[in-house]
Amino acid sequence: MGAIATLVQSELTVEPGQQVTTTLRVRNAGSIVDEFTFEVLGDAAGWTRIEPDSLRLMPGSEEQVQVTFHPPRTSAARAGQIPFGLKVSSREDPDGSAVEEGTLQVSEFLAVTAELIPRTARGRRKAKQELAVDNRGNERLNTEGLVYDENEALDFELSEPTVVADPGHATFTTLKVAPRKRFWRGPDRTLPFQIQLQPTETEPPVAVDGTLLQQALIPKWLPKVLLALLLLLLLLALLWWTLLRPAIESAARDAVEEPLAEQAAATAQLQDDVAGVQEALGQEPPPADDEDEEPVDEEPEEEEVEEELDPEPIEVRTPTDFRLNVNTGGTSVAGPVTPDGDDRLEITDIILQNPGGDQGTLQVRRGTTVLLEVALQNFRDLDYHFVGPLVFTSDDGVNLRVVCQNEPGEGNCTPSALFSGQTVSLVEPE
C-alpha cells in the first residue's frame, strides 16, 4: 500500500532571512520493509530542507522528519502565500507514494537603494542627472521623490515624481537641476543638494546626495581663443601690407602701362587730325550764300569755330629712371634731380641699396622736406612702390641725404637709391 504522510502544521508564516520548521509524519502501510525518500514541490523548493532525507521503515512502523523553510531576504522570495507540497515516495511501491500539501506565508520587506548618475553634474544654466532606484525587497515600491537643498539656491524637476519599481527591478528618473542665480566670470561654485525616498512610514528614508558644479557663463578658454583670433588677424594684415598688396600693385601697374601708351598714341593722332581741320578752315572760304539773303557776318562765326576746335594742351608721359649714389664718411647730399621748365617728375618706385651694411640714416627728400627716412643698418635692399606717385617740379627736386655713422676704420658709407617713374610734359597742339 506504500506510505501514509501527515503534516503536523500545514499553515506557516516566516520572515525573509529567518526560518520556520514543521514536522512530517511518515507511516509504512505496506507489508514489507520499505525505504521512503522526500521531495518538495512548488516555489519554495529552492529554500526548503528535509532532515533526514530518507527513512527505512518496518511494516506498520512510523517515524517523522523535520521540514525547514528558510526564504532568503531577497526579491526572489516574493511576499504573500506560497503553496507547497511534500511528496513521500516508496521504493518498493512507487504507485503508493503520498503528497501532503500546505501554505507558507512570506512576510513583506523593503530594501531600496538609490544613486545619482553622475553624482556631480556640471553646467552653466542647467544640468541633467539620472536617478537610479533599485528595489531589492519582495514587494512593489511606490513612493514620492523629494529633492531639496538647504541654501535654496537650486530649482529641481523630476521627470517622474512618483517612483515605482517591482521587486528585483530598477527604475530610472531624469532629474533637471538649475541654479537660481548665474555669474559671468570666476571659479566654479559647488552647490550640494539631496534626494529623499520614503519607502514606508515606519522605515527611515533613503537619502541620495548630489552636487551641481556651477560654471561661469564665460568659459575660461574664451579669452584665449579671442586673443588667438586677434593675433591671426594681425598676422593676415601684416602679410597683406608687406607681401600681397605690393605684388598686386606692381601687377596692376604693368597691366596699365601698355593701354596708357596706346592712349598717348591715339591722342597724338587726334592732335594731327585737329591741326589738319584748322589748316583747311584757314585756306578755304565759307560757302557762298544766295544774293537775296541778308549778308552774314563771317568773322564771329569763324572765331566761334576756332574756339570750339581749340584743343587743350596734351600731357606727354615719358618713362624715366635715374640713380643717386653717396660716398661719404659724414653727411652728404646727392641731387637734386629736377624736371625742365613746367614739366613734372612723378616717381612711383624707389629701390634703396646698402651693399656695405653701413650704419647711419638715409633720407629721400623733396627739396628740404623729408619724404622717407630709414636706418642704414636695417636693410641691404629695400624697395617701395606707390599707388599715388611722388611729384617733383623744377622748384623742388628729389635728393638723397645720408648721415654716415660707421665705426672708425670701417670706411665711408656707400648707399644708393634707384628712382623710376615718368616725366610729364605739356605739349600745345600745332
Image (cartoon, rainbow, N blue to C red):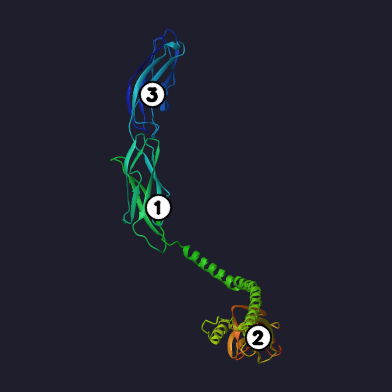
Secondary structure state at the residue bearing disc 2: loop
Tell which of 425 and 152 is nearer to you.
425
| Residue 358 percent location from the top left of the image | 68, 85
Q: Identify which amino acid the numbered label 3 is placed on.
A: Val
Q: How dense is the environment of label 2, judged by Cα within 10 Å: few (below 14), some, or many (20 and up)?
A: many
Give the amino acid type for the residue marked by disc 1 in the picture: Ala
**CB of mark 1 within 8 Å of CB of mark 3?**
no
Please tell me which residue lies in front, 407 or 423.
Answer: 423
Q: Looking at the picture, does residue 156 appear above or below residue 11?
A: below
Task: Tell me where residue 372 sits by quadrant.
Answer: bottom right
Numbered tag placed on residue 359 in the rendering:
2
Q: Residue furthest top?
A: 31
Circle 3 is placed at which residue position? 67
- The image shows residue 168 at horizontal and vertical percentages of 40, 35
CA separation in Å, label 2 and label 3: 115 Å
Q: Quadrant of the C terminus?
A: bottom right
Q: Is residue 221 above or below residue 302?
A: above
Precedes in sequence: disc 2 or disc 1: 1
Q: Which mark is residue 26?
A: none
Classify 10 Å Cα crowding around label 1: few (below 14), some (14-19), many (20 and above).
Answer: some
Marks 1/3: CA distance?
56 Å
Q: Quadrant of residue 187?
A: bottom left
Give the secondary structure at mark 3: strand
Give the mark nearer the N terminus: 1 vs 3: 3
The residue at which mark 1 appears reads as 127
Secondary structure found at label 1:
strand
How far apart, in angstroms, are the residues tagged by discs 2 and 1? 67 Å
Image quarter where the N terminus lies is top left
Other-residue count near label 3 (Cα within 10 Å), few / some / many at <14 / 14–19 / ≥20: some
